[in-house]
Image: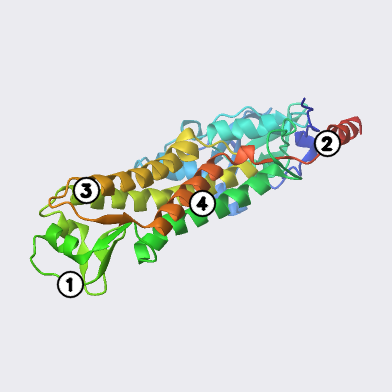
Amino acid sequence: MTLTKKEYFVKDLVIDDEYGIIDSKATIQEAAKKMKELGVPDLVVVEGEAQKVLGVIADIDIVQNIVAEGKDSKSEKILSTMYNITPVSLNTPVVEAFTRMRDLNVNVVPVVENGKLIGVSTIQDCWSYIPDQNVDEIGLIPVRNTRVAEFWFASVCVILAFTLGIILPLTGVYGFFSGSSDDLWSLLGSILTGGGKVTYYLFEARSLSIIAPFLEIGRLHPIWIVIAIFSIFLLIFGIICLFSIIYVSFSDTRNLQTGRIVRTIIPGLFVFFMVFEWILFGIAFATAIPKPIITIDSIGLTLSILSMILVLLAINRDYIFREKETVESMKKEVAS
């Protein structure tokens, strides 16, 4: 069961009346001069004596469409550079105004009343006035603001996942597998012995007296080159995953849409590369001749699994929290 929350309109916003207008017949240079005089980044473009609103020209439009392309600002007209956006009225829903700006990837929309321009509204003005469309009843933990809770939950999860899955094996706190130094010497094609226990970390095998990068082992056993390459991928996608989950969860708090690639695919690839890293180690030891005696680092395996679980929890954060607000309280809010 869902109930719509209160809907806000443009009239609920603070309409910015500190704006400038410019005629559609003006040149780009004239528009730039007026922006400088008024100290504003946007001008509303109007047509004729009736000052019919046609759209908006922004300083970024001038930079990208005129300056960057080497066009003459003295001869180019505003109509060739401005963006066409249908003005909103005071009774236009904030969601609709926000959607118009978001779809055009612009910051300003003109506001008209009885056909007369009265100001402008920015996409930033609309952010905090866009309510959740429905009560979020999916989740385990009741909270007052699900999106804020999901942001902090996802951020903490992915930071912990990156630390446990990447930072610790990278700095040698724990490894993936361990074995004797004799087995490592055989992989390196050396007859030397000694060195004690060897641990296989993210990019190298190491003991108290031996440091053997996987690329060095890969000169005799190519599978270790593959392991080194996948370790690089794991590191790269770990960093990208960290920022993508924080970015997506923050965008959700601002009601900004994000694509499937940053929401699920990139974090999913981090989990994939972590799983495949363990598989590659297993293949490398299984195909080595002579076959080494290797044991799994139990701490490393546990923390790797925990890291993957944390990423999966961050991806599926929508199922963790639900609205604390009851249906009864929503009815009271709607009635008021």
| N-term mark: 2 or 4 | 4
Which residue position is annotated with label 3?
284
Residue at (18, 47) in percent of width and height: 223
The image's mark for residue 117 is none
| N-term mark: 1 or 2 | 1
Q: Are marks 1 and 2 in contact (CB under 8 Å)?
A: no
Which residue position is annotated with label 2?
326
Which residue position is annotated with label 4?
158
**Left or right of 136 in this view: 270:** left
| N-term mark: 3 or 4 | 4
Label 2 Cα crowd, 10 Å radius (few <14 / some 14-19 / many 20+): few
- Rendering quarter of residue 143: top right
| Residue 101 spot, x, y in % from top left | 60, 34
Label 3 Cα crowd, 10 Å radius (few <14 / some 14-19 / many 20+): some
| N-term mark: 3 or 2 | 3
Q: Amino acid at mark 3?
A: Ala
Q: How far is mark 1 from mark 3, CA to CA?
A: 22 Å
The relative height of residue 145 versus residue 207 in the rendered view (above or below) is above
Name of the residue lying farthest toward the front = 293
Q: How far is mark 3 from mark 4, CA to CA?
A: 29 Å
Q: How far is mark 1 from mark 4, CA to CA?
A: 40 Å
Q: How is the image coloured?
A: rainbow
Label 4 Cα crowd, 10 Å radius (few <14 / some 14-19 / many 20+): many
Mark 3 or 4: in front is 3
